[in-house]
Image (tube, rainbow, N blue to C red):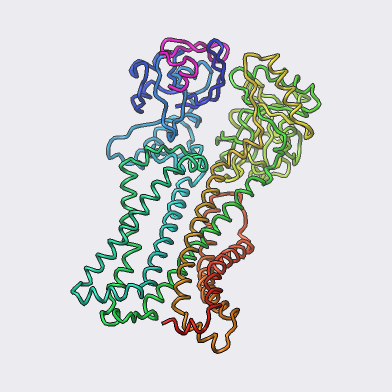
Amino acid sequence: MAFRGGLLFTEEENKFFEDGIVVVDSSFFDMFTFDFKYGNKDRVLREPNTMVITEELATKYFGDTDPVGKTIQVDQDLIFTISGVIEDPPSNTILGFKVLFPWNYLTLEDRNNDTWSSNSIMTCVKLQEGAVDTIVNRKITEVTNIYKENNTIDYMVAPFSKIHLHSYFGFGKSPGAILYVYIFGAIAFFVLLIACINFMNLSTARSSIRAKEIGLRKVNGASRMHLVRQYLTESFVQTLLSVVVAFLLVLALLNKFNHISGKDIEPAELFAGQFLLGILGVLVVTTLLAGSYPALYLSALRPLRAIREQTDQRTGSGLLRKILVVFQFTLAVILITGAMVVTRQLTFMRNADLGYNKQNLVHIALQGNLNQEYEILKETFGEHPGVLNATASMQPPYRIGSNSSGINWEGKDPEQDVLVSFTGVHHNFTETMGITLQSGRDFTGDFPSDMYNSDTLANWIINTTLADIIDKEEIVGMNLTFMGIHGQVVGVMEDFHFKPLGDEIEPMALAPLPAEMLQHMVVRLAANEPQKALTFMQEKWEEMLPQYPFEYTYVEEAIDNMYRGEEKMAILLKIFTVVAMIIASLGLFALASFTAQRRTKEIGIRKSMGAMEHQITLMMIRDFSLYVLISLLIALPAVWFIANRWLKEFSFRIELKPDLFVLTALVTTTVAILTVLYHAFRSARTNPVLALRYE
């Protein structure tokens, strides 16, 4: 499989740039099972200039008719016949293609696919049952060693079902996608656990209310096991009702959740067997987790003391309640701090210095044969005073993914193997991008000898990271050989981020290539009224190239989109944190109510002895604040460790400063105080006479 960039598709009046184009071998449909709406899987992808398209694309160009046998013009010079239409691939597949071309298409493009150094082709293999990955890896590497001299790369296979979430040979995914699954799974468990703690706390706190019932049941012959079953059944009924309400809420909020998370979960998927089994598992675990301790505690009350309602609150359950409150707020503190760390890291990535000026920088994809028009486009756009400069590159300059080994320079250690990123560019690349040159010069039309020619000669600009690896006093002027191109280094540029900030800055080499070898144009607009310049560019484009739609993207917006996944994660994390804090506060609110009720006589005596209302209020707040303080002492070191582990996924990251933890402590303490304050103030204002008559 070879992934192709966008191409212009024309069918009568319909003209669109289409992406999602994959060039595949004829065995593609033997390996992958896609349902055909039109055509036969055994007859497609075998003839040149044929293609298989998705149902979505077929409807776009041909409506509801059968398009097999009809043609679409690709670019300006190729006619492709549709040989099959498949049903749209599911949204959660990594094979999100729209068009499949047969393998011979690569020869039409003169794309070199027979070199053993290329990493632009993905090969899928089906292993024998019981095959061992490590043995297969070794055998592939051994075969490669036969054909690739001095091979230093070990090859590996990866389970296809795991490529999306796990990091395998950088398959276009940021590292640690599975980590987010673990994080949100842990958060869901924490929120549920906090709710279970509330249930246990309130059940045991209310034990005095049910004490007489328990005593009478035991006197009438009820065994402890009968009581345990009764309370577990009550817990099960309450949990079952909660599950039903929660399920209805999920259905009602599913569209909103899909919008926030960027997912596409259908309501029907919630009724799938696997999902329903998961809910059943949550029901059983929650019933046992929330109801087991109250059942065991209440069933252990002695009949005589229970009938007299003399449950001892100073023993086990009182201590356990305090421990559970501490544990509950420990989880809440971890979630609050985690949400703050994620938000700060995301803000840092969005506002970080990328090594170039992303403001007012416009990216235009030169799809199809548009690169043939680059020179005239650059000249025409430059007529407007709002267009400051323009350049071109092989890949979007903010996301360069090509790299290779085999670089060589004078005096290089033969044993040293360096993986260097590479892209071809045109004149004025560093000037247009706003990249600072440490030494030397940019590629310009004043030096025609810079440009790549058929003798595989071209000059180079390298970044500081590669210059540090070369480690010579005079880099500019030295000879460099890379990607089969021989030339001199004419400039050393400061490092710039050509990948997401989660990735380290790799060694980078730029070579000037003719415009017809480049697919991306970058235009620098003046800061004042850039829209006027864009309007001018569009008008000129439509005059010169009416057959192509004018499409552009602000580089700043494209970079923001690169971090959209982290942004959605931050939003979800904030929502879950608020939910967890509300649940924890509800538990604390109810517990404060029972505590105030139990201490009614004590408060009456204190007031009779001269205690002031504010003293009583502070006494109750102090007791609960102590639990929160203990929670902070436990949670903050734990969250510091967790946050550090998560931040290590990013090569460029924030520092964990004390103000973050101080802010968390203030938020948590304030919420706890406000939660307890109502009952504390109400208890403090109780009439001492009524308080002493309480029992």
Residue 390, image quadrant: top right
Magenta stretch bounds: 54-82
Q: Is residue 566 above or below residue 523?
A: below
Q: Is residue 114 above or below residue 195?
A: above
What residue do we see at 62% from left, 31% from top?
A: 396
Give the percent coordinates (x, y) of residue 141: 41, 36
Q: Nearer the viewer, residue 606 or 193?
A: 606
Q: Point out the residue furthest to the bottom here.
A: 609
50 magenta-colored: no
Give the percent coordinates (x, y) of residue 647: 55, 53
Q: In the displayed structure, does residue 398 sit left or right of residue 376?
A: left
Quarter of the image with the N terminus is top left
What residue do we see at 34% from left, 44% from top?
A: 275
Count of marks, rendered view: 0
Q: Nearer the viewer, residue 71 or 26?
A: 71
81 magenta-colored: yes
Q: Nearer the viewer, residue 265 or 502?
A: 265
Q: Point out the residue furthest to the left here.
A: 221
What residue do we see at 59% from left, 28% from top?
A: 484
Q: Is residue 382 above or below residue 410?
A: above
Q: Nearer the viewer, residue 307 or 10?
A: 307
Quarter of the image with the C terminus is bottom left
Q: In the displayed structure, does residue 181 sit left or right of residue 400?
A: left
Give the percent coordinates (x, y) of residue 507: 62, 41
